Structure formats: C-alpha cells, structure tokens
Image (cartoon, rainbow, N blue to C red):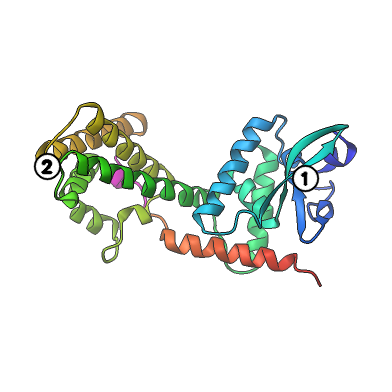
Amino acid sequence: MNQQQSLFHFDDGRLAFDDLGHENGFRYWWASDLRHALGYESEPPFHKALNRAMSTCAALNINIIENFVQQEREIDGRRVADYRLSRFACYLVAMNADPRKPQVASAQAYFATLAEAFARYVEEAEDVERVLIRDDVSEREKLLHGAAKRAGVDNYAYFQSAGYRGLYNMNLKKLRALKGVPGKRSPLDFMGKTELAANLFRITQTEEKLKADGIQGQRNAERTAESVGRKVRQTMIEISGTPPERLPSKADINEVRKSLKSTHRDLKKLDKPR
C-alpha cells in the first residue's frame, strides 16, 4: 500500500475524500483507493459492495458506464484491473458496504450530509438496499408467473393472493388495508428490507416447489403457494418472534428511487467543470 492510500480514510485529521479525486474528462476516484478508505483489507468483500452498487445503479436506470469505468492501471509495480468511480458511484458503494466498519459508517454519514444539503436524500443505507431487493423481487415474480402458467394456473391473482395468505395469515385485500397501501399499488413497494427479503424467499421457493414436485392445476398451485408462504412465516416467527404483518411500513419505493436519482444529479453537479 502506498503512502497516499494509507492516508485515504474517512477519519478526522486524515486526507479529505475530495483531495484524492482525479480529473480526466470527469472527476473520479479509484475503486482501489476507496477500498482502503472504507477499511477493506481484501478485495472480495469490497467487490461485493462494488457489484451491488452497480446493480443499484442499473435498477435506477442510471447509466453504469458514466459512473463505473473499468480501467487497467499500475499499482505497486503490477498491472491490475480497477474502476474509475464517479462521486455518485462512491456514494452507492459506501451505502452498500459493511456499516460495522467505522470507516464505512463515517463514509455513509459523509455522503448523507452532502445529500442533506440538497434537502433531498435517502435517510438510511437500508433504502438503497430496498431498491436492489425490490428489483430482484420483480424479476423473480416474472419467473414465478411463468412457472405458474406452465403448472396450469389460469387465475394468477388468486394464486398470488394464496402466497400472501400463507405468509401474512390474511389475503391480499386485507394486507393492503392493514399496511395502508394506496390504490392498486403493490404492498412490496412499501416494505422494508427484511420484509422484502422474506417475500423474495417465498417467491423463489414457490417457483422451485412448483417445478420440483410437478404441481399441476389452479387449486394445487394455490395450495403450494400458501404452504410455502406459511413455512416462511413460521421461520420468521421462530427466529425473531415478529410476524411479517407487524413489520413497519417504509417510504414509497418510487419516492426512494426519485430521491436517489436526485442525489445522482446533485452529486454530479458538484463535479461539473467550472
């Protein structure tokens, strides 16, 4: 590690984050430098945060290439693959990093303070994760819909409601009322990270069960969806003691997406050539 990297921390009295930015067509920070800044000694766990940051960017329909530019460069006498990160990319990496690391917690506070200055920001790193998990749920729901159709499901709404009934011990209509979900919006859009993850597991396992057991017919498929949902519910109660319907609702995911896109625009303005 060179001297500059060893000083690159989100700590008081150390070299400031902005001081280590580079200019070459646009303002950027090296991912390898950010890794040291966030307290990651090895690459694999950091790359997990980096990959999740890129996935979040894609889920927001923000151009990945403009924010994550892969480039080979020389570090300590060897050629390595690195990334040039925009300020927004650094923000997403920090929000997807391990908050148990003091440097990560400091970085998250640093970026949240920047965004707060614009009066538009995501209050918690969890909301960044919500966008990514919600996108995963949408993709898995498409796969489940296909599996249900192949299993002979004619009324997908009834099949879908059966899964919710198993997980929440109530049908979708009652769940909407309980959670205060407006209009025809999906309850998924108002769920926190834990609740979204539970539904993602329910959906993936229902798809697997339909295929593995060769389930056929509307009623059989509904029974399968409800049974899987009930098992996920039991597991949640056994582990945390809290049934999913008691988990608090969160801000509309569409508003979170808008907030992140606003943060992207505003952070980009900071680095516009003057």
Q: In the rendered image, which quarter is residue 174 located in? A: bottom left
> Could you tell whether 242 is left or right of 60 in the image?
left
Question: 10 Å neighbourhood of mark 1: few (<14), some, or many (≥20)?
Answer: some
Residue that sits furthest to the bottom in the current view: 274
Q: Quadrant of residue 31?
A: top right
Asked if one can make out residue 176 in the rendered structure from this viewpoint, the answer is yes
Task: Using a 10 Å C-alpha cutoff, classify the residue at mark 2 as few (fewer than 14 neighbours), some (14 to 19) or many (20 or more).
Answer: some
Judging from the image, what secondary structure is the residue with disc 2 in?
Answer: helix
- Boundaries of the magenta span: 242-248
As measured in the structure, the alpha-carbon distance from the residue carrying label 2 to the one carrying label 1 is: 59 Å
* Residue nearer the viewer, 233 or 214: 214
Magenta stretch containing residue 73, yes or no?
no
Q: Is residue 243 magenta?
A: yes
Q: Residue at x 36, y 33 (%)?
A: 240
Q: Residue furthest front?
A: 150
Query: Which sits earlier in the primary sequence, circle 2 or circle 1?
Result: 1
Q: Pointer 1: what residue?
A: 11
Q: Is residue 230 left or right of residue 87?
A: left
* Position of 4 relative to 209 (above/below): below
Element type at mark 1: loop
Whole-percent x and y of residue 117? 66, 67
Q: State the mark number for residue 133.
A: none
Is the residue 125 above or below the residue 269 in the image? above
Residue placed most toward the observer, 239 or 226: 226
Under mark 1, the amino acid is: Asp
- Residue 272 locus on image (x, y percent): 75, 68
Q: Position of residue 116 (x, y in %)?
A: 62, 64
- Residue 115 spot, x, y in % from top left: 63, 62
Q: Quadrant of the N terminus?
A: top right
Q: Residue at x 79, y 69 (%)?
A: 273
Q: Is residue 242 visible?
A: no
Q: Amino acid at mark 2?
A: Gln
